[in-house]
């Protein structure tokens, strides 16, 4: 059941995040997910539904949690290496809200082939942006390779360039042509350029001069 919470005013925001910045846990450790629901910067109380999906399989747990002063926390664990996504959702004034966060449980570090030192992340296109984010957030990464990374120029649309974030920004325009400030702010965080500024390891980038999906102008911001 999705619980309906009624509110007036600005756009409500539902978030969930792990209490650890890198979201990495050891097997059998407890991962804590922190839920927040606000509107106009003020906390909203009520109930939200939560779902755990073990390693993105059909095996799941569901339930509800009551928010106090706009916040609540959930805990979960895995006995084996893998990922534990936590999805939360509610409905406010007829608008459905959903947020998701994932904790990783030593999937790579548990492999017997790993020497404990060399960890290279590689991705292309959207995977290039994800590789940049992984290198920025996980201190164990020793090298980054990003091929024609996308989602690196979300502000480009506001400057007359092609939308560099899968048109997320341009499609958020209001009827009068303005860009949603909430979407714009979120896109700044997910931008490859934002994560690239935090990368401290040797890095290799490639761009595609005739790539129409990820043209050079989309891929160059994190390089510079």
Image (tube, grey):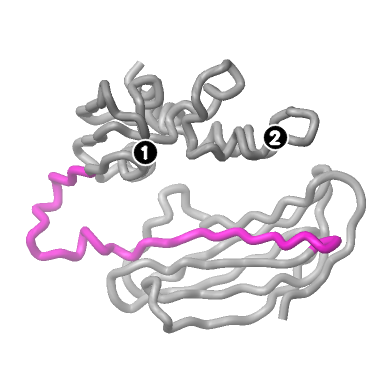
- Is residue 165 shown above or below 87? above
On screen, residue 18 versus residue 223, left or right, reads right
Of the pair 4 and 125, the residue shown nearer to us: 125
Q: Which residue is mark 2?
A: 173
**SS at circle 1:** helix
Please report the bounds of the magenta region as a residue range. 92-121
The residue that appears at 59% across and 70% down in the rendered structure is 74
Q: Position of residue 61 (x, y in %)?
A: 52, 82
On screen, residue 60 versus residue 202, left or right, reads right
Q: Which residue is mark 1?
A: 129
User: Is residue 62 found inside the magenta-colored segment of the image?
Assistant: no
**Within-10-Å neighbours for mark 1: few <14, some 14–19, many 20+:** many
The residue that appears at 51% across and 29% down in the rendered structure is 163
User: Is residue 94 found inside the magenta-colored segment of the image?
Assistant: yes
Residue 150 is labelled as: none
Q: Position of residue 127 (x, y in %)?
A: 32, 44
Q: Of the residues tagged 1 and 2, which is closer to the observer?
A: 2
Q: Position of residue 31 (x, y in %)?
A: 47, 66
């Amino acid at each position: 059941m999705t619980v309906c919470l009624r509110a007036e005013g600005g756009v409500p925001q539902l978030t969930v995040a792990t209490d650890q910045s890198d979201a990495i846990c050891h097997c059998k450790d407890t991962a804590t997910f922190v839920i927040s629901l606000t509107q106009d910067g003020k906390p909203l109380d009520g109930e939200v539904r939560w779902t755990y999906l073990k390693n993105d399989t059909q095996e799941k747990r569901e339930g509800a949690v009551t928010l106090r002063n706009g916040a609540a926390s959930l805990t979960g664990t895995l006995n084996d290496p893998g990922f534990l996504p936590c999805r939360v959702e509610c409905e406010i004034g007829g608008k459905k809200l959903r947020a998701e966060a994932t904790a990783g449980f030593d999937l790579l570090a548990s492999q017997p082939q790993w020497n404990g030192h060399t960890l290279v992340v590689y991705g292309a296109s959207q995977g290039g942006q994800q590789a940049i984010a992984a290198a920025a957030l996980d201190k164990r990464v020793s090298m980054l390779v990003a091929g024609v990374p996308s989602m690196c120029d979300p502000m480009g649309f506001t400057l007359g360039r092609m939308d560099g974030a899968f048109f997320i920004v341009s499609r958020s325009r209001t009827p009068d042509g303005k860009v949603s400030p909430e979407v714009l702010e979120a896109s700044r965080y997910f931008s490859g350029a934002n994560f690239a500024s935090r990368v401290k390891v040797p890095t290799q980038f490639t761009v595609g001069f005739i790539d129409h999906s990820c043209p050079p102008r989309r891929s160059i911001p994190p390089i510079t």
